[in-house]
Amino acid sequence: MNTPVILISTNVMNDLLSVAKDQRIPADGLDFDLLSYETYYKGTVDEEWQHLIGNNLLESTTEVEIRSSVFLLRQEYQIRIRKLTPHPYLDLRFTIATDKHKTKAVAIIDPRSTIPLKKGVQEWIKDAIMRKQLRHGLMIGIFDVNIDQEINRLLLKIQKEGPLKEPYRLPISECFPPVQPISDKVLLHYKELSKTNTLIHGVQPGDLILEYIFPKHGRDGRSCDGEHIEVDEPSVKYAKYIVIDEKTITSQEDSASIRFYANASGYVQRHKGIFSISHELQIESASFKKTGSIEAGIDKEISLKIKKKVSNEDSIGSGVNIDVQKLDVSGTVGSNSNIQACEVNIGAQTHKKSQINVTEVATIHLHRGNLKAKEANIDILEAGKIEAEIVRIKTMVGGEIVAHKVYIDTLHSNAKITALELIEIQRIEGGGNNLIINPDGIESYHEKIASMEMNIRDKTSRLQEHSKEFITKQLSFKEKNSRIKQFQLRVLEAQKNGKEPTRGDVVRLMQYKAEANALKEFSEKLKEDELSLHALRDELEKIYAADIHAEIIHHNLYNGHNRVVFIDPKTHREYAISPEGKVTHIRLRQVGDEKKLLLES
């Protein structure tokens, strides 16, 4: 191609291909120079195309109009198409990358580029970028970021750090990206309140349980090639999805959403399309396969009833966790199951590897597992373990009890019973049983003793320190005020003679009185601390005497094969006997410096 071709183009790449075809040369062998360009737009009220003066489109229209589908935009370029010749100094190797919608464009400059720090290099780079923008069908000028500033930043980097060592991203244009619509949706917040996967979800009054997010319209966009970008309307699926029981759930609405809050304690239930807060749940069984664990929390007012219809299957399956306020189980509790509740009623049996923790009353027909409760009522205890304040057993066959008070109708063999205050048995029909009064073996008693002993040690240590401090202050006070009588006489003499005492004497007397009062208050505080310490020690001694206030009662005959033990909580000395015959009451009594067992018929 010997003679350049000058023309007005609206699509530079198409015109390059057309000239190459006419000249019968490869399109890669052609390049062009941009001589000038014009921008035209047509707005909502324009009947004809309007010529844009300058490059600031927002001076002639608004962002809202630019984003609209009726707004039209085009550019015309006067170009000179010529044979491709390399620049004598600049070898700028780069590609142009855009986002999905072509609303942002960057030039990615290859570090192998040759960018000389010569006069005019900024215009050379700018010209190369604009020519490639036109090859890619991107508009120029009106959507450009501050390209001069970006090129200067690149040149400064090269000046400070040397040639590029990695690809460099240079922003070149940015238009108006579309804002995607937000479809309506429902957020089930109550499911997030529980950290585990559970059948029901417990809530408290005031908990945010549901939220309906209103649909929100998006905004159309405009790409860097001038094309309009249309966004879809938001979808509306759940506008009528949430229907609530207004007695148990309240709602609050703003421009973004409707939020639903629990009005009562319980669990969230959806029945016949209506959300409500319920307090009772009845199921046939709880297992990993059917329900998973049920962990609403004992602080929620939820009562769970499990009524098993098939007798040869567990009501609570192996490994299932139950955490509710009240639990009523008609059947059995399987192995490795874990129950937390305020009240529990189990109509069948518990597995030996089950764990049951009850803050109030537990009632169980046949217990073989591990139970902790405030009060336990058991029909049959068979090799299981119970820790409680009060335990009532109808029949005990082996097993272990640790409690404040224990009441047993019939005791068979090989049981271990440890109590703080009382063990009362109607009849013993076996042997190998250990009936133990051991206050220190009761966790609450042991913790109370340990806390009081630590308190006494701390008070004793502080009292000793304060006593030493008092003695030091007392000695200092005596030394400092050894001449106080002289000051007192001088003040009295002056007053007697109708004269004003000297200021120094008056100040010393005031200091003396203040220090004397402070010392007196310190002394009184020491006496109060001593009395408090004595009272605490007396209280500890009374608590230590728990063993002599306890008793073991048996309303039938002993056979000589059961062991009765009282353990002193202070010395840990054991007082043991295997009684025979008619002995109704066994107590430990203080006789002088010794303690002895007292048997009564």
Image (spheres, grey):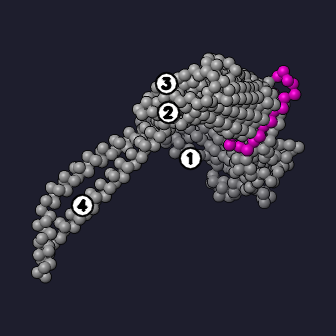
Label 3 sits on residue: 574
Label 1 sits on residue: 146
Q: Position of residue 467 (x, y in %)?
A: 28, 47
Judged left or right of residue 486, residue 209 is right
Judged left or right of residue 230, residue 449 is left
- Mark 1 → mark 3, Cα distance in angstroms: 93 Å
Label 2 sits on residue: 589
Label 4 element class: helix
Label 4 sits on residue: 515
Q: Amino acid at mark 1?
A: Asn
Q: Position of residue 281 (x, y in %)?
A: 81, 39
User: Mark 4 vs mark 1: which is more N-terminal?
Assistant: 1
| Res. 199 visible in picture | no
Choose between 278 and 457: the one closer to the eye. Answer: 457
Q: Which residues are magenta?
A: 286-313
- Foreground mark, 1 or 2? 2
- Foreground mark, 1 or 3? 3
Instruction: Indicate yes or no whether the magenta region holds residue 298.
Output: yes
Packing grade of label 2 (10 A; few <14, some 14-19, many >=20) is some
- Mark 2 → mark 3, Cα distance in angstroms: 13 Å
Q: Tell me where residue 394 sits by quadrant.
A: top right
Residue in the image at 14% along x and 78% along y:
495
- Foreground mark, 2 or 3? 2
Choose between 253 and 588: the one closer to the eye. Answer: 588
